Amino acid sequence: MNIKQRALQYTVNLRRKESYAIQSKAEKVQVRAFSFQDVSKAQQVYSASLFECCGNEKDKKVIKAKKDFEEALAKHKIRMDALYPKDFICDKCHDACVVNGTICSCSIKTYVDALRKESGLGVNTFTFNDANLDIIEDEKAKANLEKAYHQMKVFVTKYPNVKKNTFVFSGLTGTGKTCLSQAVANELINKGFSVKYVSAFKFNNDMIAVRTAPIEHQQEMLEDYLNSDLLIIDDLGTEPITRNVTLEYLYLIISTRQEKNLTTIISTNLDGDGIMTRYQERIFSRLTSKAFSLSYNFEGMDLRKL
Ligand SMILES: [Zn+2]
């Protein structure tokens, strides 16, 4: 299952639980309501009237019996809709949480929360609106960051109708590159796209696990890396390089995603030369490809010290 399927499954399961809770609560209300003799009797009269009038709810006799039933309930402070809740919480999707192949409006919030949970971003909900670039005193750093924020905002607005798909955020620790990549992630999650966010260290561990797993499980283990709408690898260069693993899988993932026009953001402390030395020519050329890639250099002061 991919991220979107898992998020949908979570959404549907939650709806089932909500629906079950409503029905179980109603059952308790029923037991209580019919323990009162007047309610029980009024309900019997109402049922009998419906039977007599072949279910015609507009018949005067039925209307009166229903009113009497409601009044009997009201005496005990019981509402009819608590006694007999609707069959579905949402009339639009009948609790399938999907209408015409898209997530129903009743379930968007749950689905987006589930996408965020699946992404690996944790509780982080940072978006472009949360960024305060005015705190940066270094003019050059501020200008660089403003430019990057602006371009990534345009990218997110146009997404998925975009040409570039690979972004390298390069700069020292604390220069804002992680915040920017998280903002892009959250903006896309809020639009219903799937995101996978990992540290380079976790990426490397995951790839070691893939490499050593039985071949029939490898595709499933790579699914999120190869097919999520956005993949973010944070802090590339801080992970250990494992022979026959790190470079091989990094290349496979980057090149596959470029060919599918799926977005990848890599943040790194390394500059171009550093990437070339550590990851070699073919990864370097993918990350700097004119057709697919854009690089940002986040120069300037350490934001974490502010
Ligand atoms: Zn619905």
Image (cartoon, helix red, strand yellow):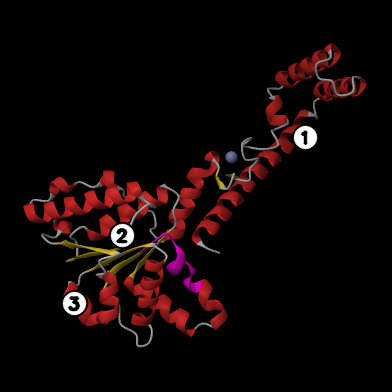
Badge 3 crowding class, 10 Å Cα cut-off, few under 14, some 14 to 19, many 20 or more, is: some
Look at 18% across and 52% down and name the residue there: 147
Q: Is residue 224 part of the magenta span, yes or no?
A: yes
Look at 68% across and 24% down and name the residue there: 79
Residue 111 in percent (x, y) is at 50, 49
Residue 57 in percent (x, y) is at 81, 20
Q: Is residue 75 part of the magenta span, yes or no?
A: no
Q: Which mark is residue 274?
A: 3
Q: Is residue 23 above or below residue 284?
A: above
Q: Dot 2: what SS?
A: loop
Work out which residue is located at the far front of the displayed protein and give it. 291
Dominant secondary-structure state across the stretch colored magenta: helix
- Spatial CA distance of label 2 from label 3 is 23 Å
- Spatial CA distance of label 3 from label 1 is 72 Å
Look at 67% across and 38% down and name the residue there: 88
On screen, residue 50 versus residue 116, left or right, reads right
Q: Which residue is mark 1?
A: 31
Give the foreground label among 3 and 1. Answer: 3
Q: Which mark is residue 145?
A: none
Q: Which residue is mark 2?
A: 164
Which is more toward the observer, 262 or 209?
Answer: 262
Q: Is residue 273 above or below residue 302?
A: below
Residue segment shown in magenta? 221-231
Which is more toward the observer, 10 or 169?
Answer: 169
> Residue type at mark 3?
Gly
Any part of residue 237 in sight: no
